[in-house]
Image: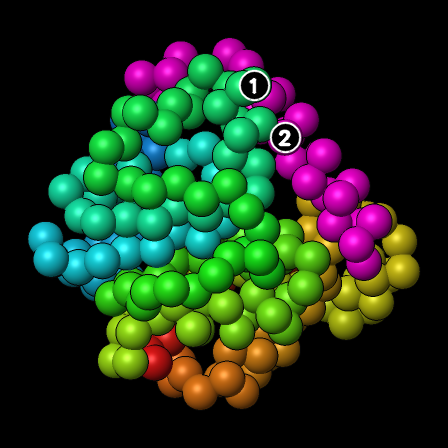
């Protein structure tokens, strides 16, 4: 799994370079902020100014960009590479965000947050069980944990993708019920499950938990 994770990480930075190559920075970031705002509205999540927030697996334009007034911790193992290779991401443009360039598995949970987001990320980690525990540990008692996943629709393709690198960016291949059970097994309660985007192999779901 470690080798597969390393291959996935190398593919991830190349994907971002291709994806952002012809997207003007200001246009892309404005679109991305609007996307995050729309997502929060659909989930009916209201962010208060005093809320502390963690963005686990933030990427170069994660949900941290939507909270310029909040205290935010943004974590991603590729942050240094994003800054070196992508003009769209510069740490100094987000004064209220503390960036941590580490894999989720290596993150030391020294404080807890009112809201923890792990969006487009949990499929990418090396150690899934440990990473699930880390995001839960980072959530305050009574706090909210919001996770997005690409969940398999068909058992046969799930089995094939586990054997072959059919989806190189995602080292883990599970369905919705399996992902939901992983989080509920570590003492958090599912508040809502939202089907956000439907595709053939995978549907994109957002799971909203309360600790």
- Picture quarter containing residue 117? bottom left
Q: Nearer the viewer, residue 143 or 184?
A: 143
- Pointers 1 and 2 in contact (C-beta within 8 Å): yes
| Residue placed under numbered mark 1 in the picture | 85
Residue 76, visible in the rendered structure: yes
> Between disc 1 and disc 2, whose residue precedes?
2
Q: Quadrant of the C terminus?
A: bottom left
> What residue do we see at 51% from left, 12% from top?
22
Q: Nearer the viewer, residue 174 or 74?
A: 74
Q: How is the image coloured?
A: rainbow
Q: Nearer the viewer, residue 161 or 115?
A: 115
Q: Quadrant of the N terminus?
A: bottom right
CA gap between label 1 and label 2 equals 8 Å
Indicate the position of residue 13 as horizontal and vertical percent values.
63, 30
Tell me if 81 is positioned left or right of 147 in this view. Answer: right
Tell me if 46 is positioned left or right of 24 in this view. Answer: left
Q: Is residue 171 above or below residue 10?
A: below
Q: Which mark is residue 41?
A: none
Q: Residues within 10 Å of mark 1 (few under 14, many from 20)?
A: some
SS of the residue under disc 1? helix
The span shown in magenta is: 1-28
Residue with the most extreme right position: 163
> What residue do we see at 31% from left, 17% from top?
26
Residue 204, visible in the rendered structure: no
Q: Nearer the viewer, residue 108 or 116?
A: 108
Indicate the position of residue 86 as horizontal and vertical percent values.
51, 19
Task: Check if residue 18 falls in the magenta segment.
Answer: yes
Indicate the position of residue 3 as horizontal and vertical percent values.
83, 49
| Residue placed under numbered mark 2 in the picture | 13
Count numbered badges in the picture: 2
- Picture quarter containing residue 43? bottom left
């Amino acid at each position: 799994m470690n080798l597969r994770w390393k291959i996935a990480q190398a593919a991830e930075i190349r994907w971002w370079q291709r994806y952002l190559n012809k997207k003007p920075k200001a246009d892309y970031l404005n679109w991305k902020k609007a996307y995050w705002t729309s997502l929060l509205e659909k989930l009916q999540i209201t962010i208060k100014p005093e809320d502390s927030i963690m963005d686990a697996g933030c990427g170069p334009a994660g949900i941290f960009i939507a909270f310029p007034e909040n205290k935010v911790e943004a974590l991603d193992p590729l942050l240094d590479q994003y800054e070196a290779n992508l003009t769209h991401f510069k740490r100094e443009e987000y004064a209220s965000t503390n960036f941590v360039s580490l894999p989720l598995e290596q993150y030391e949970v020294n404080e807890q947050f009112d809201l923890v987001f792990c969006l487009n990320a949990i499929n990418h980690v090396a150690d899934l069980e440990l990473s699930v525990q880390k995001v839960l540990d980072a959530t305050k008692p009574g706090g909210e944990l919001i996770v997005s996943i690409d969940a398999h629709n068909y058992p046969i393709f799930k089995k094939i993708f586990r054997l072959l690198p059919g989806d190189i960016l995602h080292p883990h291949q599970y369905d919705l019920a399996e992902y939901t059970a992983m989080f509920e097994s570590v003492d958090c309660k599912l508040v809502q499950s939202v089907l956000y985007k439907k595709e053939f192999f995978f549907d994109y779901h957002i799971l909203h938990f309360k600790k």
